[in-house]
Amino acid sequence: MADIQKELSYWEIQALSGPWDFVVVGAGVTGLHAAIEIKRQQPRLQVLILESRTLGAVASTRNAGFLCLGSPSELQEDWTKLGENGLMELLSAKWAGIQRTLHLLGSKAIGLRNVLGYEVFARGNSRFAQAVPHHESVLPILPRLNEIMAQASNFPIPFIPKQRKNESIKDKSRHTPYFGDWKPFHGLNPVNPSNWGPDASGCIPIAWEGQVNPFLLRESLLRYARNLGIRVQEGLQVTKTGTNILSVVPASSKPDYKYNLKTNLLDIKLKSIIYATNALTCNLLSNLSPGIIPQRGQMWASAALNPVDLARLNGNFHADRGYLYYRTQQGRLLLGGGRNQDFASEQTDEWSENQLISNYLKSYSVEVLGLPENMEWESRWSGTMGFTVSGLPQCRQLQDGEWLVAGMNGMGMALGPEMGRRVACMALQAF
């Protein structure tokens, strides 16, 4: 205790050590929604969220800010892997998650823009089309894919907060058909089709997607959680004793809690815990099977675009089964992805540049997007996502009072709210 007292005051120890009914590890989108759902259903429960970082979150504030359900070639790959029923379940979870965010926070608080989306295809002999389904292989499935999208968006929304039941939020995501007809690029830009690069072929339009400010979105969730009485503590990092995270309190002592949780500054008493650590889960739960695979995502922001390119690139753009994505923001292009060019090196939670991928993204901007070779790039960053072998998130009980929600597979902005809600419901039922 002497060492603890050197770090924390009496008041801080009293405020944080518990006992807590629930501790949620991870203050990203998923963890915040889990805690909010617990407190919404059981306001008297004491809930603490722990976040090791003092700024941002691993992926929740470092992504491209898309609210989307997936591009045609990405969903084609999911369909092959999961089957039609599995794809339907995945899409309905994304749809519910997006609607939960809109109803919970409102559009202004997250900087929402309703935009059109596009999946861009490169020419068949382009190096940017290697191992990528050509548009001609995607077009035959679009009618059925549109039917699946319509069915998924008609699933009942599991949760609409009372305070926003009467708020009018534009529901453009039910526009049908969701995926439009193939358009060569002169369909997007009839005045000057040469603005696209030599490797560009055409696109499949998407009826609705959203653009948000990820930092504002998470800040809005933090305010919402704190207003419910949830304590969010940054700078506390969970540590392990050997391979154990929790130490069990002997039942014979009859305490009002089950476990002790060790952090870098103090021990915390708790009854139940939810790990919402996504890409960092493998560091914390090293014996987890099946595991969560970290994958880094690179992002670049350009200097200001000229007016013609800015208008041409207005919307959300996807390519290469979701491995490439880009949009404009304040007159600049945000271009990211490319991890499939070097999976092995990108299987890391370290934030740094992969030069091979940077060169790939910049070449794509010239050869497909038609941007100048001397384009100035003002900033670069990376974030880490969590993936599963199955392609579906993990949302399950590990042992009595211990729960996991992780592996959003690069779709945390859409999936995180619903998966957080689901794990909270499961944990409350067993509480």
Image (cartoon, rainbow, N blue to C red):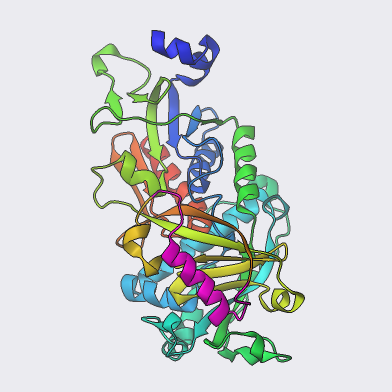
Residue reaching furthest front? 374
Q: Is residue 98 above or below residue 255?
A: below
Question: Would you say 146 lies left or right of 309 here?
Answer: left
**Residue 392 % position (x, y):** 36, 60
Q: Is residue 259 above or below residue 372?
A: above
Question: Can residue 368 be seen at all in this image of the molecule?
Answer: no
Q: Nearer the viewer, residue 291 or 341?
A: 341
- Residue appearing at x 50%, y 15% in the figure: 8
Q: Is residue 113 above or below residue 118?
A: above
Q: Quadrant of the C terminus?
A: top left
Q: Nearer the viewer, residue 238 or 289?
A: 238
**Residue 72 % position (x, y):** 48, 78
**Residue 102 % position (x, y):** 64, 55
The quarter of the picture where residue 154 lies is bottom right
Q: Is residue 269 above or below residue 387?
A: above
Is residue 371 highlighted in magenta? yes
> Which residue range is magenta in the image?
349-374
Is residue 263 highlighted in magenta? no
- Residue appearing at x 73%, y 59% in the figure: 168
Question: Can residue 284 be seen at all in this image of the molecule?
Answer: yes
- Residue appearing at x 54%, y 40% in the figure: 36
